[in-house]
Image (tube, rainbow, N blue to C red):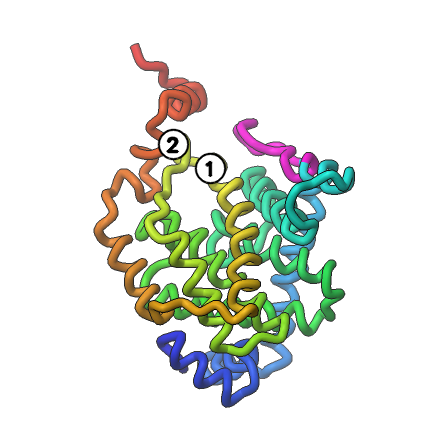
C-alpha cells in the first residue's frame, strides 16, 4: 500500500508502472482476482465513453440552465478554424459532454466525483483518438489516475465541499495529467511532476456553484481542467519539474482548503453564486423572489 506520491513512485518503479502498482494494491486490499478488478474498470470505461457519446449528441440539464455546449464545440472543431490544438479541444468537448449528461441526471463515472467526472473522461477519449490507444492502455490510464487520486484523497481532499474546487476539479485534472504522462511513455517521476504542476495552478480555486447546482461554473471548469491536464503533461514530458515536491504541494492544497471560508466551499454563498445574476437564477429556480 502507498500513502504518498513518493511511495507510489517507488512502488511503480518496482512494478513497472503506476497502473500496475494500483492493480497490485487493489488485489492485495480487496482480495479479488485480477480479472475481476480489470473487468470492473472496463465497465467504468464503458460508462465514460457512453456518456461522451450521449453528451456530444446534445442534452439539456434538468433545470434548463446548461446543455448543448458539447455539440457546439464539436461543430467548431469540425470546421477546422480553431486557435489551439484539436486534441485539447476534443478533450474540452468531451469533458463538457460528460458534465452536461451529469447535469441531465444521466449516467456518468465519477472520477473522482460526479462534479469533476468530465476531466479524465475527456482527456482519455481525446488521447485515445490521437494515439489510437488499445483497450488495455485505456484501462491502465484509469488505474494510474485512480492511484494518484487515492493519494490526494487520503492526504488532502477530493471534495469541493471540504476543500474548494481546487480539491475537486483540481484533483481530477492532476489525476488525468499524471495518467497522461504514464500513458505517453513518461516515467513515474515525470508523472508526479505533472500532478504537482497541475495542482499548483489550481491552488485556491473556490467552489461556488450557482444555485447550489453542479452546472455553473462546474461544466466549463471541467473543460478547462482537461486542457490544463494536457499542458501539464507536456511540460513534464519536456523535462519541466516542480520545485516544490508533489507531496508538499498536496499538503499545501490541504492547508489552503482548511483555511478557505465556508462561503467558497460548495455552499453557494460566495463567488459566482453570489453575483447579481447568480442570485437571480437561484430565485427563479426556487421560486423565491426577494421582496
Image quadrant assignment for residue 49: bottom right
- Pointer 2 and pointer 1: residues touching (CB < 8 Å)? yes
Image quadrant assignment for residue 151: bottom left
Give whichever of 138, 23 is nearer the camera.
Answer: 138
Q: Secondary structure at mark 1?
A: loop
Q: Quadrant of the N terminus?
A: bottom left
Residue 142: tell me if it is visible: no
Tell me which label, 2 or 1, sits earlier in the chain.
Answer: 1
10 Å crowding of disc 1: few (<14), some (14-19), many (20+): some
Residue at x 41%, y 22% (from the top left corner):
277
Q: Secondary structure at mark 2?
A: helix
Q: x and y percent of residue 240 in the render?
A: 48, 68
Q: x and y percent of residue 253 in the render?
A: 31, 58
Give whichever of 290, 20 is nearer the camera.
Answer: 20
Q: Determine whether, in the image, residue 84 is placed left or right of residue 62.
A: right
Q: x and y percent of residue 29 in the render?
A: 45, 81
10 Å crowding of disc 2: few (<14), some (14-19), many (20+): many
Please, is residue 190 above or below residue 86 in the view?
below
Residue 221 belongs to magenta span: no
Give whichever of 248, 260 is nearer the camera.
Answer: 248
Please, is residue 232 above or below residue 73 in the view?
below
Residue extent of the magenta highlight: 59-72
Distance from Cα at disc 2 to Cα at disc 1: 8 Å
Residue at x 30%, y 34% (from the top left corner):
270
Give the residue number, with chain letter if any, for mark 2: 272
Q: Main secondary structure of the magenta part?
A: loop
Give the residue number, with chain letter if any, for mark 1: 217
Image quadrant assignment for residue 288: top left
Residue at x 73%, y 60% (from the top left corner):
130
Q: Residue furthest bottom?
A: 14
Amino acid at each position: 500500500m502507498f500513502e504518498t506520491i513518493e511511495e507510489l513512485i517507488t512502488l511503480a518503479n518496482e512494478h513497472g508502472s503506476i497502473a500496475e502498482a494500483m492493480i497490485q494494491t487493489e488485489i492485495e486490499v480487496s482480495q479479488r482476482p485480477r480479472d475481476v478488478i480489470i473487468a470492473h474498470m472496463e465497465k467504468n470505461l464503458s460508462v465514460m465513453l457512453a456518456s461522451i457519446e450521449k453528451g456530444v449528441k446534445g442534452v439539456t440539464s434538468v433545470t434548463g440552465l446548461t446543455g448543448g455546449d458539447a455539440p457546439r464545440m464539436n461543430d467548431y472543431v469540425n470546421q477546422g478554424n480553431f486557435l489551439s490544438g484539436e486534441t485539447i479541444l476534443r478533450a474540452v468537448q468531451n469533458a463538457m459532454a460528460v458534465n452536461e449528461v451529469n447535469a441531465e441526471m444521466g449516467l456518468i463515472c465519477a472520477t473522482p466525483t460526479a462534479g469533476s467526472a468530465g476531466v479524465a473522461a475527456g482527456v482519455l477519449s481525446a488521447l485515445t483518438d490521437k494515439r489510437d490507444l488499445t483497450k488495455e492502455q485505456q484501462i491502465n490510464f484509469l488505474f494510474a489516475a485512480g492511484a494518484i487520486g487515492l493519494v490526494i484523497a487520503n492526504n488532502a481532499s477530493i471534495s469541493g465541499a471540504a476543500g474548494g474546487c481546487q480539491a475537486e476539479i483540481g484533483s481530477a485534472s492532476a489525476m488525468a495529467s499524471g495518467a497522461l504522462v504514464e500513458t505517453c511513455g513518461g516515467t513515474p517521476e515525470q508523472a508526479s511532476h505533472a500532478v504537482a504542476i497541475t495542482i499548483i495552478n489550481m491552488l485556491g480555486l473556490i467552489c461556488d456553484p450557482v444555485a447550489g447546482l453542479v452546472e455553473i461554473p462546474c461544466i466549463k471548469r471541467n473543460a478547462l481542467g482537461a486542457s490544463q491536464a494536457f499542458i501539464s503533461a507536456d511540460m513534464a514530458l519536456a523535462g519541466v519539474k516542480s520545485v516544490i515536491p508533489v507531496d508538499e504541494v498536496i499538503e499545501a492544497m490541504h492547508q489552503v482548503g482548511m483555511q478557505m471560508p465556508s462561503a467558497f466551499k460548495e455552499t453557494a454563498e460566495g463567488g459566482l453564486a453570489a453575483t447579481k445574476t447568480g442570485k437571480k437564477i437561484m430565485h427563479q429556480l426556487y421560486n423565491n423572489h426577494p421582496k
